[in-house]
Image: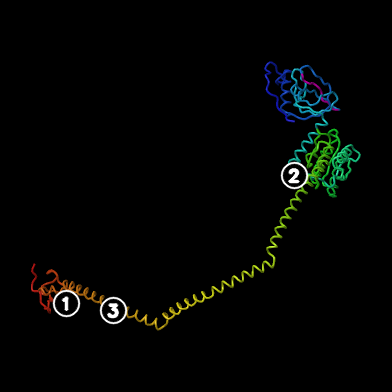
Amino acid sequence: MVRSRPATVNCRAMESPAGEPVYTVSQLNREARLLLERSFPALWISGELSNLARPASGHLYFSLKDEQAQVRCALFRGAARSLRFRPENGQQVLARARIGLYEPRGDYQLIVEHMEPAGDGLLLRRLEELKQRLAAEGLFDAARKRALPALPRRIGVVTSPSGAAIHDILKILRRRFPAVPVVIYPTPVQGEAARAGIVAAIASAGARAECDVLILARGGGSLEDLWCFNEEAVARAIVACPIPVISGVGHETDFTLADLAADLRAPTPSGAAEHAVPEGGEWLARSRELERRAQAGMGRRLEQLAQAADGLGQRLARMHPALVLQQHARRLAELRARSGRALPALLRLRRLETGHLLARLSAATPATLLASHREQLDRQRERLLGALRLQLAAGGQRLAVAAAALQAYSPLQTLERGYAIVTEAASGRVIRRATEVDEGTLVSARLAEGAIEARVLRKLP
């Protein structure tokens, strides 16, 4: 239990001989109430009702007790209105409450927020927890449900052979469709052995595979009476059964986990039997309608086949061997006539083609080709010689022009006009300025015709 230190109180008016604070009664009750409310959250508690009082205010005051202790309780008007039963002294209940303390009297008590009969409440809580867990695994998914056969060959019933449910089921099956046989898989449907018996009967029906649909049924009863149909093992056996299962447990208001796990839930055992087989009269009327439609369809089909046979007979008459031979004979005579007319024309055409080919062959003989090539060669030779003459004449003319231009720029022409080229006799270096030689240097002068050597006597500016 969580313990908290008492809150600081105003005790300046009085102190104990040891100097510690002194509580007043109201302060003590207030601190005790706060401590209880903080230390205990809302909790579930079970016990027997006693000292029940119903004042005009609408609140309920009572005690919850067991063999060794009791505690006072209060159920206020708002919560009392939501009760789904009438509390009575001596009744075992399950309550959800908060712990408190009534300060004016210092009474420790429970403030009840919800209350229900203990037996059904515990069972319902267990049932809800199991239902949520199995639903989370997908055992109740609609996608897993299987469709029932339109007309089963045999129906299995898992129930007590001595109960009222089997008599109701057999009566309904005989009335609706007596031709369908029924197999009973006996099992207890109430008490300690019911769960194992139901699981074994469902497993036996699935293993024997002699039925097309299985009815799981029981008459009405209390929640405890029907509890075997809320067992996890029964729900898993229904889901694992290879045969579609119809549940018809209890009355229309009863609802069990077997109903959720089954492929179809019927409100009663009789309702399960009605779902298992069609109505005989309706099925007979439907069979007659199908028979009428089949006869009409067969008549139309026979008429179609007769028309097809007539068409085939006409085709066979047209394809008779004698008619085919006559057609082939006429075709052969026609081809002979056409070939007699076409052969002379073909021969004339072939003669013309042969004449053309001979003429082309004559023109393509080696002698003819050689003469033609010689003529082409002579023409090419004449064209080549003419082109060469033209090229030589053009080249001579260009050469004369270039020679005249070269002659105009030739240093010899300059020398012809009285000029000379002076070089140093020893090195052959051309002398362009007087400052490039010294007096007494031997020089050579190139003239238009010949050359002379001289020595520099003096240099003039």
Residue 128 to residue 212: above or below: above
Q: CA distance from mark 3 to mark 2?
A: 109 Å
Residue type at tag 1:
Ala
Residue 375 image offset from top left, x and y in percent: 34, 80
Q: Earlier in the sequence, mark 1 or mark 2?
A: 2
Counting from the top left corner in percent of width and height, residue 81 is at 76, 23
Report the amino acid beneath label 2: Arg
* Residue 144, disc: 2
Nearer the observer: mark 3 or 2; the answer is: 3
**Horizontal side, residue 344 vs residue 103: left or right:** left
Q: Residue furthest bottom?
A: 367
Q: Residue at x 67, y 67 (%)?
A: 324
Q: Earlier in the sequence, mark 1 or mark 3?
A: 3
Residue 442 visible in the shown view: no
| Magenta-highlighted residues | 58-66
Amino acid identity at mark 3: Leu
Which SS class for mark 1?
loop
* Residue 61 lies in the magenta stretch: yes
Q: Give the image location of residue 100, x and y in percent.
A: 75, 24
Residue 199 position in % (x across, y down): 84, 44
Work out which quarter of the rendered image holds the N terminus and state it: top right
Between the C-alphas of marks 1 and 3, the distance is: 56 Å
Q: What residue did someone put label 3 on?
A: 385
Mark 1 to mark 2 CA distance (whole Å): 130 Å
Of circles 1 and 2, which is in front?
2
Relative to the observer, which residue lies in front, 309 or 407? Answer: 309
Question: Where is the C terminus found, in terms of image quarters?
Answer: bottom left
Where is mark 1, residue-wise? 426
